[in-house]
């Protein structure tokens, strides 16, 4: 900004106009909101054409509204989306540790007496945090980012899955469509409660919930039509994996 040009002036005026137009808006909190720290994180995989680095974001909720958040560019180039997402958990995890200590020192330890649910939409990143899955695709990740695995083992964070369309931190990583913005902005500001029960499902379609039963069978629930046809006529909608896949491939939606 040492040598601003007319384009910079226009951008500054754009920000001021937006702030004036939305001066009556803000963040809301509620006693009916979540009473435990809850976190979301995300990273785009749209590298900056100037330096090939991606943007990431995260947010921590308490009492229905955000109490800490971040939106930054990675300090490194990410070769894959899993790498970008996994490395996002490190700064989020650091803030969670700090928030847990702060709550405890203030006498509100009940807000953080459990592992903080940490929601991300990349299953490979979640699996690497939980199970330390080393593969040729992730062996280049710098050691400093693996500290999140220690956070998980020590019970500070609990990595969980969230559907991309239900992830409020998605707005902190990139420009999104108007539909995605309208769906998520109220949740990001605490104006609309987050439905934690359905976080892993797609809000725009019927969801498939597959659970591993003690008898190593698949239990299929809330299926779209093609899956419903696959399990039609079977007792308790349970079957072997091979039978399920055979029925699915040979079924068609009505």
Image (tube, rainbow, N blue to C red):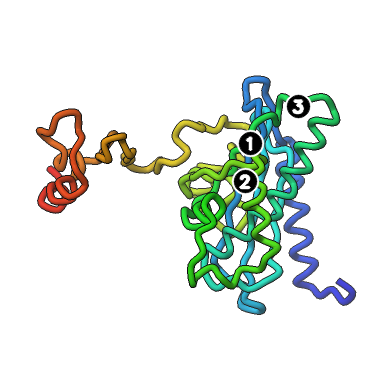
Q: CA distance from mark 2 to mark 1?
A: 8 Å
Q: Are marks 2 and 1 in contact (CB under 8 Å)?
A: yes
Furthest residue toward top: 31
Q: Residues within 10 Å of mark 2 (few under 14, many from 20)?
A: some
**Quadrant in which the C terminus appears:** top left
Residue placed under numbered mark 1 in the picture:
115
Residue placed under numbered mark 3 in the picture:
109
- Left or right: residue 251 versus residue 183 is left
Q: Residue 233: horizontal and vertical position, in percent?
A: 10, 33
The structure residue drawn at horizontal position 81% and vertical position 75%, both measured from the top left corner, is: 5
Residue placed under numbered mark 2 in the picture:
152
* Chain-order first, disc 3 or disc 2: 3
Q: CA distance from mark 1 to mark 3?
A: 12 Å
Q: How many marks?
A: 3
* Chain-order first, disc 2 or disc 1: 1
Quarter occupied by residue 96: top right
């Amino acid at each position: 900004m040492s040598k601003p040009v007319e384009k910079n002036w226009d951008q500054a005026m754009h920000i001021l106009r937006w702030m004036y137009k939305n001066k009556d808006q803000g963040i809301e909190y509620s006693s009916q909101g979540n009473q435990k720290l809850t976190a979301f994180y995300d990273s785009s995989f749209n590298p900056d054409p100037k330096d090939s680095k991606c943007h990431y974001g995260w947010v921590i909720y308490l009492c229905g509204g955000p109490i800490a958040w971040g939106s930054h560019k990675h300090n490194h180039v990410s070769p894959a989306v899993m790498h970008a997402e996994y490395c996002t958990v490190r700064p989020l995890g650091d803030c969670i540790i700090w928030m847990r200590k702060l709550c405890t020192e203030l006498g509100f330890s009940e807000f953080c007496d459990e592992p903080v649910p940490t929601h991300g939409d990349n299953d490979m990143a979640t699996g690497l945090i939980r199970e330390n899955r080393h593969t040729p695709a992730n062996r280049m990740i710098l050691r400093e980012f693996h500290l999140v695995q220690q956070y998980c083992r020590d019970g500070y964070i609990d990595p969980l899955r969230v559907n991309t369309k239900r992830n409020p931190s998605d707005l902190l990583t990139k420009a999104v469509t108007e539909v995605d913005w309208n769906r998520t902005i109220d949740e990001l500001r605490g104006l609309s409660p987050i439905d934690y029960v359905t976080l892993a499902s797609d809000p725009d379609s019927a969801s498939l919930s597959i659970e591993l039963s003690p008898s190593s069978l698949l239990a299929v629930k809330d299926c779209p039509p093609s899956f419903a046809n696959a399990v039609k006529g079977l007792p308790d909608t349970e079957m072997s994996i091979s039978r399920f896949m055979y029925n699915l491939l040979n079924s068609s939606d009505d």
